[in-house]
Image: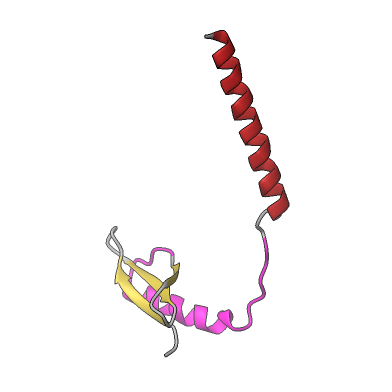
Amino acid sequence: MAGYFKLVDAHDGGFRVKLTAPDGSLVAVSTFFATKQEAISGIELIREIAGTGPIVDHSRDEELVQEDFLRSATAELAADAGEIRRA
């Protein structure tokens, strides 16, 4: 079985589209669509571009994420140590 698009009611009165994998797991949720026709047009657009769209990586480098985490954790420990010394 292929994955599928699930058209659902949005909490704020419009519609959203959920892209679901063959095993039923959620892959993506669309933006808000005011009408059902807009949601269907969104699905058609996704179908047109998904197979040929390039991957454009705007994520942070994993090493930078780890460095930021370590820097943040070190700063928090230093701040905690300073508070303990003052107490």
Q: Residue drawn at (66%, 71%), measured in percent from left and top?
A: 55
Residue 16 is situated, as x and y percent measured from the top left of the image, at: 36, 68
Q: Is residue 5 above or below residue 30?
A: below
Residue sitting at 55 percent across and 15 percent down? 84
How many numbered marks, from 0 up? 0
Magenta residues (range) = 31-57
Q: Quadrant of residue 73?
A: top right
In the image, residue 54 above or below residue 71: below
Is residue 34 covered in magenta? yes
Which residue occupies the foreground of this view, 74 or 49?
74
**What percent of the width, then of the height, locates residue 29?**
43, 67
Asked if residue 70 lies left or right of residue 30, the reply is right
**Residue 70 pos. (x, y %):** 66, 39
Is 76 situated left or right of 29 in this image? Answer: right
Q: Give the image quarter of residue 36.
A: bottom left
50 or 45, nearer to the observer? 50
Colour basis: secondary structure
Residue 8 magenta-drawn? no
- Residue drawn at (58%, 80%) of the image: 49
Seen from the viewer's position, the closer of residues 81 and 12 is 81
Quadrant in which the N terminus appears: bottom left
Residue 18 vs residue 63, the one in the foreground: 63
Relative horizontal placement of residue 79, taking residue 67 as reference (left or right)? left
Quarter of image, res 23: bottom left
